[in-house]
Image (cartoon, rainbow, N blue to C red):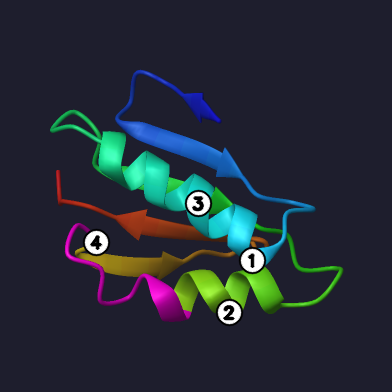
Amino acid sequence: MNQNNSGIIELDIHGMTKYQAKISIDSQLKKANGSIYRIRIIHGYRNGTELKDMVQKDYKNHKKVKRIEIGMNAGVTDLVLRDL
């Protein structure tokens, strides 16, 4: 997990099970205060899409997540908590 001063938390869940990844993501969502506006989930894609699919499905209706953004990198999904 890496938090830079830009209000973005980067969370690498490579190699985790879906259960482990969910616990890590839930923990970061719980800890995210007003200075955090985005959690960048690095899930990878070369070993399948199980983690990516879980992130996009399980967090699209989460109470703290305003929307999900899928960028140019297929191995990353952003959970947007608020707009700047």
Residue bearing mark 1: 18
Question: How far from the left and from the top, in percent, is residue 77?
Answer: 51, 62
What's under tag 1, amino acid-wise? Answer: Lys
Say above or below: 28 vs 66: above
- Three-letter amino acid code at the position of disc 2: Asp
Which numbered disc, 1 or 2, marks the residue that appears first in the sequence? 1
Local packing at callout 2 (Cα closer than 10 Å; few below 14, some 14-19, many 20+) is few
N-terminal of the pair, mark 1 or mark 4, is 1
Classify 10 Å Cα crowding around label 3: few (below 14), some (14-19), many (20 and above): few
Q: Which disc, if any, is residue 53?
A: 2
Which residue is pictured at 36% across the width and 70% down the height? 59
SS assignment at label 4: loop
Q: Which mark is residue 23?
A: 3
The residue lying at 51 percent from left, 46 percent from top is 24
Discs 1/4, front: 1
Crowd band around label 1 with a 10 angstrom C-alpha radius: few (<14), some (14–19), many (20+): some
Camera-nearest label, 2 or 3? 3
- Tag 2–tag 3 contact (CB < 8 Å): no
Instruction: Kindly report the distance in space between the C-alpha atoms of the residues bearing marks 2 and 4.
Output: 16 Å
The Cα–Cα distance between marks 3 and 4, rounded to whole angstroms, is 16 Å
Compare marks 3 and 4 and give the one earlier in the sequence. 3
- What predominant SS class does the magenta segment belong to? loop
Kindly report the distance in space between the C-alpha atoms of the residues bearing marks 1 and 3.
9 Å
**Of residues 30 and 41, the one drawn nearer to the viewer in this rendering:** 30
Q: Which residues are magenta?
A: 57-64
- Sequence-first disc among 1 and 3: 1
Separation (CA) of disc 1 from disc 2? 10 Å
